[in-house]
Amino acid sequence: MADKSQICSVWVGSETGILKGVSLAKKQAFNFCEMSSLSRDQEVCALCWGDAQESEVLVGCANGTVKTFSTEKGIFTESRQCGDGWQGKFTGLAVTDSALVTCVESGLVNVWKEGSTDTVEINAGSSVCRMRQNPSQRHRVATGGKENGLKVWDLERPDSPIFTAKNVRNDWLDLRVPEWVRDMAFIPDSEKIVTCTGHHQVRVYDPASPQRRPVLEAEFGEYPFTALSLPCSPGSVVVGNTQGQVAMLDLRKGLVRGCLKGLAGAVRGLQCHPSLPLVASCGLDRFLRIHSLEDRSLQHKVYLKSRLNCVLLSSRDLEAGPPAADTDVEVKEKDEVEDEISEVGITLL
Amino acid sequence: MDTETQHEIQAKSKKQKKKMKSQKKREKLKKDAVEKDAVEECKEGDKPPEIAFPPTFSVSEIKNKQRRHFMFMKYKQEKRKEKLQLKKKKKKEREALGDAAPPKPVPKTIENQRIYDETTVDPEDEEVAFDEGTDEFSAYFNKLTNPKVLITTSDRPRGRTVRFCEQLATVIPHAHVYYRRGLALKRVIPQCVARDFTYLMVVNEDRKVPNGLVLCHLPDGPTAHFKVSSVRLRKEMKRRGKEPTEHHPEVILNNFTTRLGHSIGRLFAALFPHDPQFVGRQVATFHNQRDFIFFRFHRYIFKNEKRVGIQELGPRFTLKLRSLQKGTFDSKFGEYEWVHKRHEMDSSRRKFHL
């Protein structure tokens, strides 16, 4: 298992509870689970890296357990019960220094400290759709959901949010505009936060300014957005909706820069590579697709057999092999691995 | 002599057979002309025959209509003769070779040239088996639920749509036809769930012609949206049998090979009760060909040990999948598992999705 997991550069969580690793360089995909003990309540709802070296993947399951998968050993090393299944599925998972942050649909944000049983609880309101961590200030998280506006929390001061968004003004009929935050992201090198909504809007909030309403609003398509991701180049955002339309929007004026083609079903997970102009998308059509953001062409397409919920990219070059530490081992393994291709039976396009 | 060589050349060129039709036509006419002119040439002396004729001579250039018609008929006959001869020759060769004959070439169709679909289901695949074993239809396939179908239409149905619904209800056992009464589907669905319906079927009509079908599995999806075409009701059918009986029919699902096809096949299979009553000798067929799903309803009879007779009972119609949505009907906020995007997906005629 270890040699398989080391070459994987894309990790995908599926609805059937399987963690899948995909190696784009070798054009292979692997399942990391026991096929005998599969069940739907192990559905993978959230994925995140456990450490900065990206040697551990944290897998949030629907039944409330967070499993730790070691990419070096290729096995699940640890399992931890974080809340009960009845509070809803995980909507976000994050790691701060020596603590694990989880968020469930009911709006309960928990901070699980390493080694101690006491937890910090934050109630972020009902029906939370997503929780995201600020990658530069790791103790800050944002939450948002249906009829539950964007809130930014400081985990060190859990009593009240440091920023609460205000709903936009009433429309021309003087009716209240419904709120439904589906996903959000912190824009690096600024205080700004970009969100996408279930009413096909993209909004940018600026907590640094006194204005609590969005500073920019853009629309795309007519179906609810489900996922959002920020590419490495600043000034744009990639959003995906329930019909499999993925678009790159410009954050200066809110115009569409281009659409990514080839998706057949709803987008569930979207992530841009931290340094390369690549975006990985997965969803209900059971395919993992990797598009280039430069010419918007489809680079890779992998059929992964189950509906996919979330995707996680490693920060190294996706096409390259495993980390440079064990290159000579890899050369030996190459022939063996090529033999396996026919066994696995998954082809990349 | 000259004509003979001409003939030889012609024959050779015919053997080569790689030339365009029009060119052949021209040559043939040239040949006729050569025959005529050759006589004249013999009188005049030896001249290269090619120079004597305009290079572009065709039947259509003949001004006399009768003559033109005659020439064309002659040309056609000649061609037919040739074709038959070639066929005969090939057959003879094949007979002469006996068992050593090369296998007959299979005609190319867009189906057997189909682009390989990587989602084609391998029956031994554990993961797909698990996925299918625990999906929304698993309750039906584990024989925990019995199907009960509600058939309704778009608001104020007229003409053929009403009869179509009635006839569908005779094909599907435990089906109830209800008048829509202008109700919203999202409000109908909870009531259906409360009354233990497992399917909601909505026939949409446009100008008195049924043109759409929404098939929603209850209580938690999925929902499929089909285009309906070529509806032929019982009355319009030739050589149809008597009215169908109330026995549970057998179901045949053909060519649903991909992962999406499997989902759709399961959706259709779960419409009918588990155990077919073979006494009724009725079969409902969903045949998928080039992503079109053809529905037929037959009664069969075993005439003797080898022969089976079938009799169509009707109605017949064709479906084409437009979208498959997860969950019950929600066209605005529902998540689609598959949407047919014409400009993106129909770029190749040899690519099929079901």
Image (cartoon, rainbow, N blue to C red):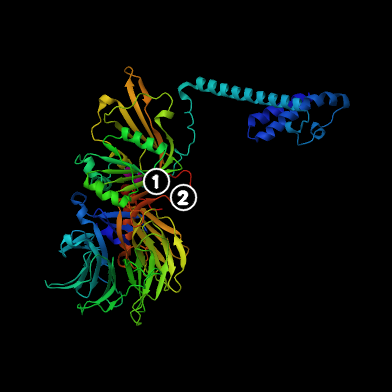
Binning the other alpha carbons within 10 Å of mark 1 as few (below 14), some (14 to 19) or many (20 upward) gives some
Please identify the quadrant where the C terminus of chain B is shown: top left
Query: Measuring 47% from the left and 48% from the top, which residue is drawn there?
Result: B346
Residue B71 counted in the magenta span: no
Along the line of sight, the residue nearer the viewer: B103 or B319? B319
Q: Is residue B262 magenta?
A: yes
Counting other residues with Cα less than 10 Å from the Cα at mark 2, is it few (<14), some (14-19), or many (20 or more)? Answer: few
Badge 1: chain ID: B
Q: Residue at x 32, y 48 (%)?
A: B223
The residue that label 2 is drawn on is B342
Q: Main secondary structure of the magenta part?
A: helix
Q: Is residue B210 left or right of residue A102?
A: right
User: Which residue lies under the disc numbered 1?
Assistant: B117
**Residue B71 percent across, percent down from the top left:** 72, 26
Q: The disc labelled 2 sits on which kind of residue?
A: Arg
Residue B94, image x, y percentages: 51, 23
Left or right for A224, reference B140: right
In the image, is residue A105 above or below residue A17?
A: below
Position above or below: B140 against A48 = above
| Chain letter, disc 2 residue | B
